[in-house]
Image: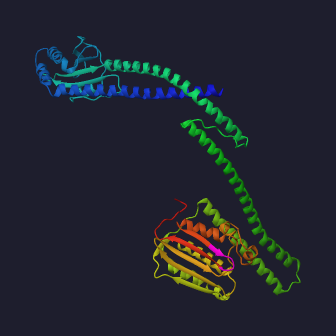
């Protein structure tokens, strides 16, 4: 069944490859013949009437006795230039008022002819050399003034029999070519299908095994041609799919962990809020001071839950590509000074030494100032929170080649080497208990990385346990923004 199906499709494809070009060629040839013959006709007529003595002779004949007969004689003499052959092309001498046929090359006086637009134009006194290559006739009408008020119209009509004959010959020739091509295509299709079917059967069996979850089946490669390349590619694809499935399993595991983390992070403040609220509701004897303490806890937990939801919404906008940067040229030096000034009180409260070091005058950068300050604030707050009291946090800024480098170094607890690769994972915390105490959600660093990457920059973290952590941010001087709307 597969063999017959493949052969039938291959034969059908070969027939299309033969017939479609032939049909296109035939259409172009037919139209080309029509256009050429039409152009040649009107060019020949216009030349004959405007660049020879014909029109002068006709006007002289129109002034004689029995003008129509004399005009016929002149047109007969000029018949060669006009291409008159009586079978396909003829001339007629018409009365300019009634369009009655006075004389004709076929000696057919009084014949009825169709009144064409060209005849109407000539009856109104204008030369008419207009025509359409798609119509089934070609004609030219030229007015000739006679004696007194008697005027005539010389009318040349070609029935396009020559064009139709040429097109018929073209059609017969192409039909013969198509028939020969059909025979050749059938023979070639049979030969190719037999050569390919053995490999296709092998690929089919391997694909069926893959559909059943078995990726161990391999196709033997017996040639170096395209079939061999296909076989090797199929084997590589099987390996990649197997690897991809493993990655999907890991991703699914991470997704479940993420959902569990979100549920846990939201459940913890909700549990606290409910516990303290129920206590206040069920214990009217509580002192005002205790009640205020409980309400303070409820407000703090609500704020923490709000921050978690806000951070999750921001990350979801990053993932969906709905975040836009408000780009402007601003002073990164002033942004660093403003952020350090904003956290200075918290640093003093914990006895930390907050140092700001800036190399010379930093150049302006093009970016979203609010987002960049958000990143700096996030990193510096982390450094303050994870550094024991009376520690030191240093913020350094400098220009290196074509980017700004910001380095934030602390003397905190540090990060173990095994945790460093995961510090940018969402909800990941090295010290979960301490992070929760300090109000951390585990989303600050992922958000910071997204913002830096959108600016075309880079962020890296190095750390040594019990010595400290260094966060290095690189922002390009030139605009290389990876705006999600692009």
Question: Is any atom of residue 331 visible in this view?
Answer: no
Q: Quadrant of residue 305?
A: bottom right
Q: Position of residue 177 (x, y in %)?
A: 43, 21
Q: Is residue 219 magenta?
A: no
Up/down of 49 relative to 473, above or below: above
Q: Position of residue 458 (x, y in %)?
A: 55, 68
Up/down of 39 relative to 216, above or below: above
Total label count? Answer: 0
What's the image's color scheme?
rainbow
Of residues 482 and 92, the one nearer the viewer is 482
Q: Is residue 299 left or right of residue 410?
A: right
Up/down of 409 relative to 251, above or below: below
Q: Quadrant of residue 27?
A: top left
Up/down of 103 relative to 441, above or below: above
Of residues 109 and 97, the one nearer the viewer is 109
Furthest residue toward top: 107
Provide the residue span drawn in magenta: 462-467
- Identify the image quadrant of the N terminus: top right
Seen at 19% across and 18% down, the residue is 80
Seen at 59% across and 35% down, the residue is 222
Q: Is residue 24 left or right of residue 265?
A: left
Seen at 36% across and 27% down, the residue is 31
Of residues 482 and 412, the one nearer the viewer is 412
Question: Is any atom of residue 476 visible in this view?
Answer: yes
Q: Position of residue 348 (x, y in %)?
A: 64, 88
Q: Quadrant of residue 24?
A: top left
Q: Is residue 452 left or right of residue 51?
A: right
């Amino acid at each position: 069944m597969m063999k017959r199906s493949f052969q039938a499709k291959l034969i059908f494809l070969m027939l299309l490859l033969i017939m479609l070009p032939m049909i296109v060629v035939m259409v172009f040839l037919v139209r080309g013949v029509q256009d050429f013959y039409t152009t040649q006709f009107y060019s020949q007529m216009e030349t004959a009437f405007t660049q020879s003595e014909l029109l002068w002779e006709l006007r002289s004949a129109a002034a004689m006795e029995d003008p129509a007969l004399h005009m016929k004689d002149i047109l007969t003499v000029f018949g060669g230039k006009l291409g008159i052959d009586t079978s396909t092309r003829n001339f007629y001498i018409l009365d300019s008022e009634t369009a009655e046929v006075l004389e004709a090359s076929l000696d057919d006086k009084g014949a009825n002819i169709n009144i064409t637009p060209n005849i109407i134009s000539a009856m109104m006194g204008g030369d008419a050399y207009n025509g359409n290559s798609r119509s089934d006739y070609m004609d030219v009408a030229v007015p000739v003034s006679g004696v007194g008020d008697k005027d005539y119209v010389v009318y040349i009509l070609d029935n396009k029999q020559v064009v139709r004959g040429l097109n018929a010959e073209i059609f017969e020739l192409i039909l013969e070519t198509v028939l020969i091509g059909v025979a050749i295509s059938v023979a070639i299709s049979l030969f190719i299908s037999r050569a390919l079917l053995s490999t296709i059967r092998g690929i089919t069996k391997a694909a069926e095994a893959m559909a059943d979850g078995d990726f161990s089946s391999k196709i033997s490669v017996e040639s170096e041609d395209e079939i061999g390349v296909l076989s090797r590619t199929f084997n590589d694809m099987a390996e990649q799919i197997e690897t991809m499935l493993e990655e999907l399993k890991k991703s699914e595991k991470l997704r479940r962990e993420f959902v569990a983390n979100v549920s846990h992070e939201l459940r913890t403040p909700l549990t606290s809020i409910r516990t303290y609220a129920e206590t206040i509701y069920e214990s009217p004897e509580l002192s005002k001071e205790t009640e205020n303490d409980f309400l303070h806890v409820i407000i703090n937990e609500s704020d923490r839950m709000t921050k978690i939801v806000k951070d999750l919404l921001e990350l979801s906008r990053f993932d969906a590509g709905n975040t836009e940067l408000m780009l402007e040229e601003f002073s990164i030096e002033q942004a660093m000074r403003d952020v350090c000034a904003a956290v200075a009180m918290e640093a003093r409260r914990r006895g930390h030494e907050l140092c700001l070091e800036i190399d010379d005058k930093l150049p302006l950068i093009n970016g979203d100032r609010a987002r960049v300050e958000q990143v700096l604030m996030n990193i510096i707050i982390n450094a303050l929170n994870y550094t024991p009291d009376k520690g030191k946090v240093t913020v350094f800024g400098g220009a290196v080649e074509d980017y700004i480098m910001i380095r934030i170094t602390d003397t905190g607890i540090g990060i173990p080497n095994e945790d460093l690769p995961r510090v940018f994972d969402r909800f990941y915390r090295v010290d979960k208990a301490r992070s929760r105490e300090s109000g951390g959600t585990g989303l600050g660093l992922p958000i910071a990385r997204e913002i830096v990457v959108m600016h075309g920059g880079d962020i890296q973290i190095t750390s040594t346990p019990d010595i400290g952590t260094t966060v290095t941010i690189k922002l390009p001087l030139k605009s290389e923004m990876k705006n999600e709307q692009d």
